[in-house]
Amino acid sequence: MAAIELITAAVCPYAQRTHMTLIEKGLDFERREVDLADKPAWFEEISPRSKVPVVKIGDEVVWESAIVNEFLDERFPEPPLMPRAPFRRALARIWIDHCDARFVGDNHDLLFEKDQARRDELRARVAANLRYIETEGMAKLSDGPYWLGEALSLVDLAYYPFFERMAALRHYRGVEIPDDCARIRAWLALMAERESTGATMNGDAYYIERYAKLADAA
Ligand SMILES: N[C@@H](CCC(=O)N[C@@H](CS)C(=O)NCC(=O)O)C(=O)O
């Protein structure tokens, strides 16, 4: 079989999703790191949207992290990272979409917001988003400990990189996971133990330093 190539950047949460998926699948792959501030010509040729991640297996080139991850799950079925039942699969996709459509934007806006009053509004929204995930997502989907139950799924892998990057929000904006979000807290502790997390995580100091200028913290 053709070698699997992951075109990636350590800073990118979407690419981390796919990197973690490859590790969770137990696959051998070659990692090609791209400097997004100085993109090489080979990358522009291979990445239709000029973004990471991209996965290439011979002639098969796939991009967009949520789609890449489902492609990998279908192409390499063991261990399965999506439920089998159509309705549960639909729910998994709804919550993966929720991450990109709702969860990520407010986190990003809060980190980059300069106005104090607007920061307070966004802080409240981020806390509300976390409680929504806790009560409408995790609590209704399963008894845990992962989003969909006993086994890790693509939903866990979609969200985890964004929780890792909340280190910068904690540092610059005082955001904590609310005390009443016990499921999220337990899930984060569990995710921290996974090999795929250990192999791809950057650590709090990396994000704190990386976002210093943009968070206006100097
Ligand atoms: N929706 C895309 C988002 C990927 C994305 O935004 N990647 C960023 C890095 S985190 C990127 O490659 N940016 C380069 C650019 O836009 O020039 C996905 O899920 O794969």
Image (spheres, grey):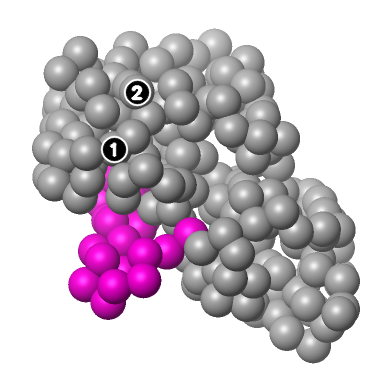
Q: Quadrant of the N terminus?
A: bottom right
Above or below, 129 relative to 181: below
Residue 147: image quadrant is top left
C-beta proximity under 8 Å, tags 1 and 2: yes
Q: Quadrant of the C terminus?
A: top right
**Relative to residue 84, is residue 38 drawn left or right?**
right
Magenta region: 81-104
Looking at the image, is mark 1 or mark 2 earlier in the sequence?
1
Does the closest atom of ligand 1 sit within 8 Å of the Cβ of label 1? no
Residue type beneath disc 2 = Ala
Residue 57: image quadrant is bottom right
Give the image location of residue 24, x and y in percent.
62, 50
Above or below, 76 relative to 103: below
Give the image location of residue 49, x and y in percent.
61, 73
Query: Which of 218/188 is in front?
Result: 188
**Relative to residue 145, is residue 4 drawn left or right?**
right
* Magenta-drawn stretch contains 115: no
Residue occupying the point 33% across, 22% down: 185
C-alpha separation, residue under disc 1 versus residue under disc 2: 9 Å
Is disc 2 surrounded by few (<14), some (14 to 19) or many (20+) residues within 10 Å? few
Is the magenta region chiefly helix, strand or loop? helix
Residue to which mark 1 is pinned: 144
Residue occupying the point 59% across, 33% down: 194
Above or below, 151 relative to 61: above
Is disc 1 surrounded by few (<14), some (14 to 19) or many (20+) residues within 10 Å? some
Residue to which mark 2 is pinned: 186
Residue type beneath disc 1 = Gly
Residue occupying the point 82% across, 58% down: 28
Give the image location of residue 114, x and y in percent.
34, 26
Is residue 151 something that shows in the picture? yes
Residue occupying the point 19% across, 35% down: 134
